[in-house]
Image: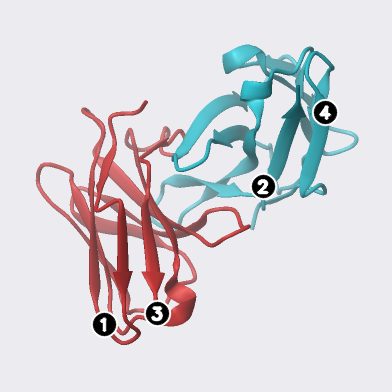
Amino acid sequence: AQSVAQPEDQVNVAEGNPLTVKCTYSVSGNPYLFWYVQYPNRGLQFLLKYITGDNLVKGSYGFEAEFNKSQTSFHLKKPSALVSDSALYFCAVRDFLSGGSYIPTFGRGTSLIVHP
Amino acid sequence: ETGVTQSPTHLIKTRGQQVTLRCSSQSGHNTVSWYQQALGQGPQFIFQYYREEENGRGNFPPRFSGLQFPNYSSELNVNALELDDSALYLCASSLPSGRTDEQYFGPGTRLTVT
């Protein structure tokens, strides 16, 4: 089965500083990777995805992610953090269902806290 | 905001009881997936429905069951509730085959079992 790992439970960063939320993956075949964000008392929102092509993927709200095949990583980044970016971030990998469809399989999540 | 809605928002049940959670999918989406998100964990896949048939199932016991209706709305039923069933239950809708990993989530139902 495909899987992702998020090694940090929490990331703290000052507003205006760059942020990185880490994710590594383990897959058979080509990886299809995603980032989702969850704000308090809300469902998950899709941020961006990597399928193929450029290793730097741009997504919503100024976020981007860097795919690195040699390090099997897909880290989420933003050049300048905002207090409103504080949320739970989930990395996910495309997994195959026996019924012929796909689902995202999620990591444990990383809590991002941006301090004013 | 996605067009996926879930009801109720919160509910409290007693161990051994049964519960039904409801989900309306985003317009044009005929595939619905359900997830359980325990506190401090990522969402865990329960099952997926496509055209009213179960299309795949995660590692959950048979007391977790579901339905999908002709209008693509869906229900999650849990029988014989256990304390460990306390979690946020998320519904997600998606386009059919090839696009089902791009999922649009509802706000969730917070279930507390006492």
Label 4 vs label 2, nearer the camera: 4
Position above or below: B109 against A47: below
Residue B102 at x, y percent in the picture: 46, 33
Q: Share a chain, discs 2 and 1?
A: no
Q: Nearer the viewer, mark 1 or mark 3?
A: 3
The chain drawn in cyan is A
Q: Nearer the viewer, mark 2 or mark 1?
A: 1
Question: Residue A109, which numbered label?
Answer: 2
In this figure, which residue is indicated by the disc labeled 3? Answer: B114
Say few, some or many: other residues with alpha carbon within 10 Å of mark 2 (under 14 / 14 to 19 / 20 or more): many
Question: Same chain for marks 2 and 3?
Answer: no
Q: Amino acid at mark 3?
A: Thr
Return the chain for callout 2.
Answer: A
Disc 1/disc 3 C-alpha distance (Å):
10 Å
Placement of the C terminus of chain B among the 4 image quadrants = bottom left
Chain label for disc 1: B
The residue that appears at 32% across and 79% down in the rendered structure is B63
Real-space CA distance between mark 3 and mark 4, rounded to the nearest whole angstrom? 38 Å
Element marked by disc 2 = loop
| Residue at the outermost front position | A116
**Alpha carbons under labels 2 and 3: distance apart:** 26 Å
Residue B97 falls in which quadrant of the image? top left
Residue in view at x 57 percent, y 16 percent: A60
Q: Look at label 1 and name its amino acid.
A: Gln
Amino acid on which disc 4 is placed:
Val
Residue B17 disc label: 1
Which label sits in the foreground, 2 or 3?
Answer: 3
